[in-house]
Amino acid sequence: MNQSNNLFLQSEDDTDFLPIIPLNENDGDDGQELIIPEELPVLPLRNTVLFPGVVLPITVGRDKSIRAVNEAYRSDKLVGVLAQRDSTIEDPVVSDLEEVGTVAKIVKLIKMPDGGTTVIIQGKRRFRLSSITSEEPFFKARVVLLNEEEAPKDQDFAAYVANIKELATQIIHLSPNLPSEASIILKNIENPSFLIHFVSSNLSTELADKQRILVFDHIKERADLLMQLLQRELQFAELKNKVTNKTRTELDKQQREYFLQQQLKSIKDELGGDHNDREIREMSKKAETKIWPATAKEMFKKGIEKLERMHPTTPDYSVVYNHLDLMLDLPWEHYTEDKYDLKRSRQVLDADHYGMHKIKERIIEYLAVLKLKGDMKSPILCFVGPPGIGKTSLGKSIANAIGRKYIRLSLGGLHDESEIRGHRKTYIGAMPGRVLQSIRKVQSSNPVMILDEIDKVGSDHRGDPSSALLEVLDPEQNNSFYDNYLELEYDLSKVLFIATANNIANIQPALRDRLEIIDLSGYAIEEKSEIAKRHLIPKQKEAHGLKTIGFKISDKILEKVIQDYTRESGVRELDRQLASIMRTQAKDYALKGKLKSVLTLQDIESILGKPRYSNEIYKTSNMPGVAVGLAWTYVGGDILFIEAVLSEGKGELKLTGNLGNVMKESASTALTYLHANARKCGVDPELFEKKNVHIHVPEGATPKDGPSAGITMLSALTSAFTGRKVKPYLAMTGEITLRGQVLPVGGIKEKVLAAKRAGLKEIIMCWQNEKDVQEIDSSYIKGLTFHYVRTMQQVLDLALL
């Protein structure tokens, strides 16, 4: 007999049953001659169904079953095989057995060494249980044999048979645990009835389904049900095979990658180790000597552990690596040692910058406290003043004086808040804010940091950088500054922040409140001359290759250049004019091989052209209705004319010259005061009804605003109405009230220096501004006469001839 192992996905629970195909397919059909005894021993099968013609080896273990097999083997070797309804029942009763079974012949009985019994049985005929005659010592029953229907000869049934063979073959091919010989056996079975029984017996399906096939009398019904079960089994096999293949593919890919990684690791070890591993080891070694807070140490440790688990080709590897690299590069608790030699610090400041005594004193005070106390929160200074006076360069000078590193952050036009606080490191191209980047660059946690042009910070949909600066510039908060990229707090309290600005009004109020404002005024002519001699001329000589060539620019020539070719608070325009002189000198030396030892006024005019500015305009006798006022702009002090003209009309007031609202109100206030006090001022009251008044401020393209031209407008109006001229070489500044009071104004130093530059000799201002004049070096205002007034009447008495 041929033997087939575990056909058609037979589960491991069914391995007690191993179907064997008989040599003669019709052995199961000789049941017509079968003589059945009146009482047939019954053998319950727990987990299979026996079909006619099929041979099964069965291991018999239950006492009842062993007795039944032995009894049958001693007599005619016939036994009735019935399937249990529930295979879990160990000791079945009559109700637990199916009604239809198969008469089987015991082909062989084998006694096993362990005491068990194995019998090989072959199904002969189906039967229906009539009655149980005995239950002890084993089941005996009367049975009725069921007739077998002949297989139809038509094409329809032949297609059934062919389809069953095809489906069973496909299942065998899809099942890796079934031998390929099983398909050959199937093809060689010719008896349709035996084919159905053999395939049904080996089908891995529910016991109830197999029993239904056995119960059907018509062979076509059995074939139809078998086909349905085979279709379901095929779908299950295909799905199982698909899942198995997918899993195998994934495992193969993982195994391949693992194998390649191991090979790569071996190659790298031969070459001296993995580059990434070496980098990680170097970072860990560097971290051991790093002095930093416990929170930073813990975060670095977690980052290194994460990096070790990652493959270098993954996108997140570089993100984590760059973050750890930043943590290592930051100086954390590393500080440069301050130089507490106050005399030397003062010398450095004096050598680098002329004047600026207030700022220098403030820095020396700060160093003195540091020297005595050893530690203090750095002040947040803000230098406010016109362009070109050396605010930014002063910051560098301060850093040199106290021995600290120098950082300059240009905030002009900054719109993005992330420039200060940094981006989240998950973004592509993320980086820390410019504050931490700069500290990383200089490798010191206590540098001097210049926040240049803080009044020109912008704001838009990307955030408000000036609001982000609130945390940076608050001494109570900046010891725990949070950068979005670093994701840790960083101590900025030891940083000496110095902001620079031209116009304090443009700084956000909350930010302005955190700053210690130090006003820087423009330079006097004497100061500019000294700065030119000490710094600008040597710098330009060196820049133009004239350092070793001897020629001089006298004080008189310098003053000529300053007065006639520049009108500024700082020295940038002066620097450019000196550069023009040096270029011409360099050209002459290159052509002639020699230079004049001293430059003359004619030389200056030939180089720079005719004077751009002249003071002659103030020396000419002015017509009535014209007065000179003093103004403050963000580039420093300036002078302006106020012109008043009367014309026939109905008493209307017309204002021109691009005036702001405050200045217009000052004009209205001045006219109302003059109208109310006409007789006192020597004006005919009827003129106000008959004359139109036109006030104009020249340079109409330049916007002008502020209250400080109040007394100038009143003087011009009074001069126009009375016909009395305003005194020449006279300037004035001050706010007025309807009661005729003169109020103080700001920017006095810039205004006084502007008057001095313009060649004016007398200045009228409020008595409360006297303290501001006293702060100006007396040598810079030599030749100026100041008149301090309380009322408008005093102004008119002084101003009008």
Image (spheres, rainbow, N blue to C red):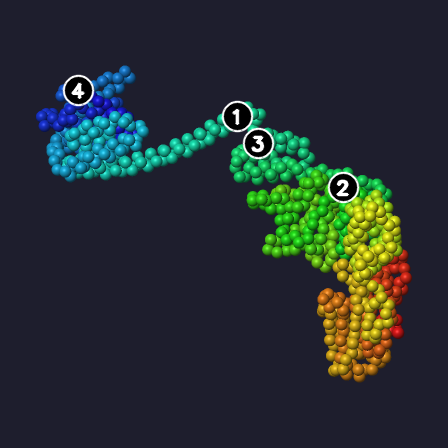
Separation (CA) of disc 4 from disc 3: 79 Å
Q: Earlier in the sequence, mark 1 or mark 2?
A: 1
Residue on which disc 2 sits: 404
| Label located before the other in sequence (4 or 3) | 4
In this rendering, position of residue 151 left or right of residue 312: left
Tell me the CA gap for discs 3 and 1.
14 Å
Please give left or right for residue 577 compared with residue 149 in the image.
right
Identify the mark nearer the N-term, 3 or 2.
Answer: 3
Q: Position of residue 184 (x, y in %)?
A: 23, 27
Q: Quadrant of residue 222?
A: top left
Q: Is residue 308 left or right of residue 238?
A: right
Pick whichever of labels 3 and 1 is earlier in the sequence: 1
Of residues 620 and 7, the one drawn nearer to the viewer in this rendering: 620
Q: Nearer the viewer, mark 1 or mark 4?
A: 1
Q: Disc 1 marks which residue?
A: 267
- Residue visible at 82% across and 68% down in the picture: 628
Front: mark 4 or 3:
3
Q: Which residue bears the numbered disc 4?
A: 73
Question: Label 4 to label 2, Cα distance in Å?
Answer: 111 Å
Of the 4 image quadrants, the one containing the N terminus is top left
Residue 599, percent from left and from top: 86, 53
In this figure, which residue is indicated by the disc labeled 3? 276
Where disc 3 sits, the SS reads helix
Label 1 sits on what residue type?
Ile
Amino acid on which disc 3 is placed: Asn
Looking at the image, which residue sits at the far left? 33
The reply to whether discs 4 and 2 touch (Cβ–Cβ < 8 Å) is no
In the image, residue 718 sits, relative to residue 51, either above or below, namely below
For disc 3, the neighbor class at 10 Å (few under 14, some 14 to 19, many from 20) is few
